[in-house]
Amino acid sequence: MEPVAELQDVSRVYRMGNTEVRALDEISVAFGLGDFWSVMGSSGSGKSTLLNLLGCIDRPTSGAYLVGGRDTKELDDDNLSQLRGADIGFIFQSFNLIPQLDVLENIMVPLFYQESPPLDGEDRARSLAERVGLADRMNHRPGELSGGQQQRVAIARSLINDPSLLLADEATGNLDTQTSREILDLFREFNEEGKTILLVTHEEEIGRQAHHVLRLKDGKIDEIGQGAG
């Protein structure tokens, strides 16, 4: 089966004056449908650069990044943005919710950027709010929610376009232990329904819960191992 996303000999080089920094160095890895990966490594190992490339926020200096078999280097910025909106969901450590909007509106934000938003957008948002345990909080704004509840909104928002790939950046980093476990349970639930999930984390206990563990060191793959998930 064709991978949901695949990196083929991908490098990302930044130039700072006369200095060349290889943030990623010839990375090759494929993420299959329904895989659950954790990405781990020390600060400066390349985790953030990898996530930016996978999310089509940045482009490789060399090599190829394929999403659903499409080579992203062949896409212009508009088509890349469309691909990102349709196929990739983002979950951030800082939630990135809009404080003036309520839960339902925050979940629907990705739909606002579509040329032809689906007519059932609000129904989708309500259904997702219920799935993540926020049925009684739909009219609340972010400032009226706990950190765990805000992260649940962010998870629901990432799923509103039914993407094939979910990218979570330290999604449990600001949460207490119990709430982290609840968020991880949500990830497992959506993963079991076929979503491919990549969770960037510095927490060993969280990282080991994935199916596969990708460890980076100095921009290279240090190890690919099996998790407990």
Image (cartoon, helix red, strand yellow):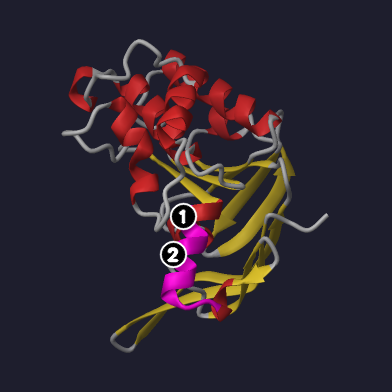
Residue at 47% across, 38% down: 160
Amino acid type assigned to the residue bearing label 2 in the image: Ser
Q: Residue 1's quadrant in the figure? A: bottom right
Which three-letter amino acid code belongs to the residue tagged 1?
Gly
* Residue 174 covered by magenta stretch: no
Q: Position of residue 170 (x, y in %)?
A: 43, 39
Residue where numbered disc 1 is placed = 85
Residue at left offset 59%, top offset 48%: 165
**In the rendered image, which quarter contains the C terminus?**
top right
Crowd band around label 1 with a 10 angstrom C-alpha radius: few (<14), some (14–19), many (20+): many
Residue 34: give x, y in percent of width and height. 71, 40
Foreground of the two, 227 or 103: 103
Inspect this view and state whether residue 219 appears. yes
x, y percentage for residue 166? 54, 44
Q: Nearer the viewer, residue 161 or 27?
A: 161
CA gap, disc 2 and disc 1: 6 Å
Cβ atoms at labels 2 and 1 below 8 Å apart: yes
Residue extending furthest toward the right: 1
Q: Is residue 6 left or right of residue 202?
A: right
Q: Residue at x 38, y 46 (%)?
A: 110
Image height of 89 relative to 69, above or below: above
Residue span colored magenta: 75-85
Percent position of residue 57, x then y: 42, 63
Q: Secondary structure at mark 1?
A: helix
Q: What residue sits 71% from the left and 28% below the top?
A: 228
- Magenta span: predominant SS is helix
